[in-house]
Image (cartoon, grey):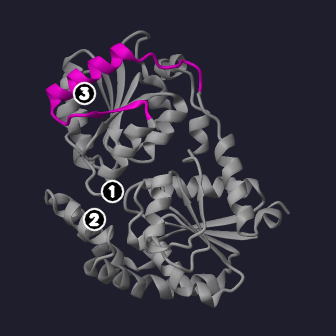
């Protein structure tokens, strides 16, 4: 049995969810393959799509306007964008499935969901699943040929039914990658990172793109005597700035794009980040969250949802305000020192039940 997972290279969250699903499927005996929905469009179209997205983010308020006015409502511009991406992604996906058929396609990126929805009828035995961890899935996630939607909240289920009233929906816990369930103890993590025991320590990050004024925030926290593990992600200019800051402020410890996030979370007392799937990973390790409002559109919706889930507070993006919020958080929280506070059992049970709902439970177990 083969499953095809359609991720997307805009941000890291989609790859994280694709990896979590792939791990669970392989443990059930599936073969898995993960494709980047953006790459399916070809280098020219995918490059243009990423430039447009970055351009919208670069202009204050622009992506908010596009998200709330167009994507959430399925407006004319959103439909144009979907048709444009499908023009390139559909033929590539059709060829992929012709060469390597799959019994199951899980789309964790809206472009993949749109392409799959357009060719579902060509593969009568194939089951299609859309997995969206946003609290308000926008119109481009929803396609009436979808067999099952996986969401992580009642609110998300309600938004899907706005566009697909008869939808089959399963509410599941947000999964985390296996390495987060194997995170070291705080003591071991601090020894590895040379962070003294008993010193206040935070993890500061802004997603894989290093969004937000991380450099200014890290400098303020370091000046306040707080060990700050600062992650620039793929933002190379931010990484260079953090490295220079470390040279004059040793309590700021810089990282670029790194696979050591479980270790960094374990070493910290508080995690400062943007809203996203990182929040679920921090909760596995039992860390309090301070959330920066730096991701517009769906990021603002998700921030509100993370606050509702608890163990989180909104954080200001100005250096003095963040320092005050961090000092207060350090005073009121006492992070667990054991390895993890959550296990993958709830996710595995829910994911297995979801496969059974679309007739793949017994087949997956073979």
| Disc 2 packing (10 Å; few <14; some 14–19; many ≥20) | some
Residue hosting label 1: 298
**Nearer the N terminus, badge 2 or badge 1?**
2
- Counting from the top left corner in percent of width and height, residue 319 is at 16, 30
Displayed quadrant of residue 176: top right
Q: Earlier in the sequence, mark 1 or mark 3?
A: 3
Q: Nearer the viewer, mark 2 or mark 3?
A: 2
Residue contact between numbered discs 2 and 1, judged by CB atoms under 8 Å: yes
238 over 26 or under it: above or below: above
Above or below: residue 78 compared with residue 23: below
> Tag 3 or tag 2, which sits nearer the N-term?
2
Mark number for residue 53? none
Q: Which residues are magenta?
A: 310-339
Residue occupying the far top of the picture: 198
The residue shown at (23%, 38%) is: 214
Dot 2: what SS? helix
Q: Which mark is residue 246?
A: 3
- Which residue position is annotated with label 2? 67
Find the distance from the CA under tag 2 to the CA under tag 3.
Answer: 37 Å
Is residue 328 within the magenta segment? yes
| Residue 89 magenta | no
Image x and y of residue 273, in percent: 34, 38
Classify the position of the C terminus by image quarter: bottom right
Q: CA distance from mark 1 to mark 3?
A: 33 Å
Q: Nearer the viewer, residue 187 or 158?
A: 158
Q: Quadrant of residue 122?
A: bottom right
| Residue visible at 35% across and 75% down in the picture | 46
Disc 3 residue crowd, few under 14, some 14–19, many 20+, Cα 10 Å: some
Secondary structure of the residue carrying numbered label 1: helix
Q: Position of residue 288 (x, y in %)?
A: 42, 27
Residue 68: which quarter of the image?
bottom left
Q: CA distance from mark 2 to mark 1?
A: 7 Å
């Amino acid at each position: 049995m083969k499953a095809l997972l359609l991720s997307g290279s805009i941000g890291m969250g989609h790859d994280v969810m694709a990896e979590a699903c792939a791990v669970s499927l392989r443990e059930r005996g599936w073969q898995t393959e993960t494709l980047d929905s953006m790459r399916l469009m070809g280098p020219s179209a995918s490059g243009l799509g990423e430039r447009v997205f970055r351009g919208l983010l670069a202009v204050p308020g622009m992506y908010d306007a596009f998200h709330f006015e167009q994507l959430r409502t399925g407006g004319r511009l959103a439909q144009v964008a979907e048709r444009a991406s499908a023009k390139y992604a559909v033929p590539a996906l059709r060829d992929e499935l012709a060469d390597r058929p799959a019994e199951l396609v899980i789309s964790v990126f809206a472009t993949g969901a749109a392409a799959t929805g357009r060719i579902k009828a060509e593969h009568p035995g194939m089951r299609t699943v859309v997995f969206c961890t946003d609290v308000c899935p926008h119109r481009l996630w929803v396609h009436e040929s979808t067999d099952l939607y996986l969401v992580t909240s009642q609110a998300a289920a309600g938004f899907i039914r706005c566009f697909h009233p008869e939808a089959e929906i399963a509410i599941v816990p947000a999964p985390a990658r296996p390495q987060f369930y194997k995170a070291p103890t705080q003591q071991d993590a601090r020894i590895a990172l040379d962070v003294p025991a008993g010193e206040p320590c935070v993890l500061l990050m802004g997603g894989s793109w290093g969004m937000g004024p991380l450099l200014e925030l890290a400098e303020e926290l370091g000046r306040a005597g707080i060990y700050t593990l600062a992650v620039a992600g793929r933002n190379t200019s931010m990484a260079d700035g953090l490295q220079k800051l470390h040279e004059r402020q040793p309590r700021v410890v810089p990282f670029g794009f790194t696979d050591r996030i479980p270790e960094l979370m374990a070493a910290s007392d508080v995690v400062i980040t943007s809203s996203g799937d990182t929040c679920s990973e921090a909760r596995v390790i039992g860390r309090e969250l301070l959330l920066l409002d730096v991701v517009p559109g769906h990021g603002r919706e998700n921030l509100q949802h993370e606050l509702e889930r608890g163990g989180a507070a909104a954080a200001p993006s100005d250096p003095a305000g963040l320092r005050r919020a961090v000092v207060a958080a350090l005073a009121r929280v006492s992070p667990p020192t054991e390895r993890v506070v959550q296990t993958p059992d709830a996710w595995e049970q829910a994911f297995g039940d979801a496969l059974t709902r679309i007739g793949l439970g017994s087949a997956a177990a073979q």
